[in-house]
Image (cartoon, coloured by chain):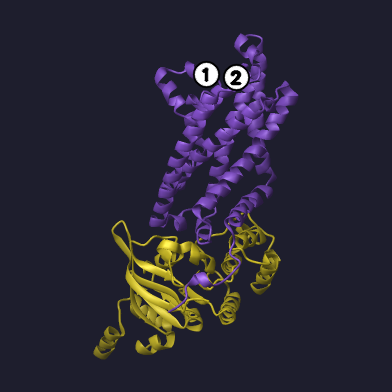
Chain colours: A yellow, B purple
Amino acid sequence: MLAETAIKVDRLTKRFNGVTAVDAISFTVPHGRTIALLGGNGAGKTSTIAMLLGLLLPTAGSIEIFGVDMLRDRFRALPHLNFSSPYVELPHRLTVRENLSVYGRLYGVPRLRSRIESLAEELDLTEFIDRPAGKLSAGQKTRVALAKALVNRPDLLLLDEPTASLDPDTADRMRSFLESYRARRRGTILLASHNMAEVERLCDDVIMMKRGRIVDRDGPAALIARYGRSNLEQVFLDIARGGDSPARHEAETSAA
Amino acid sequence: MSETISHFEPGIASPGRRIAAVVLRYWYLLRGSWPRLFEIAYWPTIQMVIWGLITLHLTGDSSWVTQAAGVLIGAVLLWDVLFRGQLGASLCFLEEMWSRNMGHLFVSPLRPHEWVASLVIMSLIRTLIGVLPAAVLAIFLYDYNIFSLGLPLAAFFANLMVCSWWMSLLIIAMILRFGLGAEGLAWLVVFLFAPVSAIYYPVSVLPEFFQWVALALPPAHVFEGMRGVLFGEPFSWGHLAAAVGLNGLYGALAGTIFLIAFKDARRRGALLNQGE
């Protein structure tokens, strides 16, 4: 049985050569929720995700994934999570099937062949499953990366720009897939995205980051209401362009 | 209180299966490219043919070579064991860097030492693919059978393979630290050791200081041992013990340096960012 808290981060800090990328952030994510990490470039989203995955060592703070201390015992948690990012690629010369087969084996996926067939069908990979991953279009690569991220049926899925490079139709199908995946698996999803409509549709909660800090957190609808805006994109712009809190925003609109 | 992760979920791969999965990844790569497979065997064979011809030429002129006609061919084949072994592990590592795959690998349950084990296995496979055809061809072309060395050959081969692995670990550590700008080390480092490895000549030929350097490295003991056997001397257990001991020492050092470099790469975020 899983711990009720999927992610627990406490005063997580990362400094690179004196530059603070992530500044003592703390948050928890209950299991079964879909959470977005939002923020402009350099806000600290990718560093935060990399630390959650164990790829980047924090300067200070702690991370627990399903109750496991990731800094001391990450190999107990790693079989239960997975990730995809358009910035971390799969081996170019291996076919899609070979890639999924290698990662399926790394995770010890039972009945791997049928798992790959089912992922290929669900994510529409069948047509190019025996083609080298390096020869695919950007959109096809994104779908393959998602298939790799799902191959072990992770309880925690970390997605960096999950629908980047996808055409609107395919992106919509991916979102539907993630919705149904969450419903079926009751898994936790943490995603970083610049697509606000996607975040509004998929996420229960949004963590807003700016300059390495968490500046706000709430459900998409609550954030929109609190900032007095009509959509999440406007809230994002408010925060990115200076408004760190609804209080400040309220003061600005009252003055106007 | 919440239960932690230890209480659920079967189906996690054993270390052996994870190692096999990564070996499979490199095998897919080899299998998918016949030119690549051909190239692995090409250079050792060409080297062997050239040194075989040199041996034929020298046999008439040199009593030293006449005494042990296979000494140069044996040396070139064993040198290729060291070179191909080191290159085999280093290139598999570079494949991960070139394809920006390190992030995916180390988000999986694969431990660093399991990954190193898979590199070692691939190094062995690539060395056998490279050197076996040359060794067999030497029987037909020059009537020289390196396998006639018998058990000592196994000892020489094992020591050179282990030596190639710790060299690879050092190279991997350097590339993890300095990025792909240092990838040339995969081809260069082994040749730094070549002059003091006494491959084609005895250690006594070297200036005194370099004799000490040579004897502080495992390959010189292997090649001295090989020459001794080819010249009809008894197998040198002293050279074998020295090679094994030095390999153990340098292997432990290289392993430690690799782990430090790997942790440093995690500290700098290099597992995510490195690539072409």
B196 left or right, relative to A128: left
Residue beneath label 1, please? B202
Task: Tell me which amino acid carries mark 2.
Answer: Pro
Helix, strand, or loop for circle 1? loop
Where is residue A72, by image quadrant? Answer: bottom left
- Vertically, is A116 above or below B153? below
Where is residue A64, by image quadrant? Answer: bottom left
Q: CA distance from mark 2 to mark 1?
A: 17 Å
Q: Residues within 10 Å of mark 2 (few under 14, many from 20)?
A: few
Residue at image point 44% right, 46% down: B258
Q: Position of residue A164 (x, y in %)?
A: 52, 70
Q: Which mark is residue B234?
A: 2
Q: Position of residue B58 (x, y in %)?
A: 63, 13
Helix, strand, or loop for circle 2? loop
Q: Position of residue A113 (x, y in %)?
A: 70, 65
A249 left or right, relative to A56: left
- Vertically, is B66 above or below A238? above
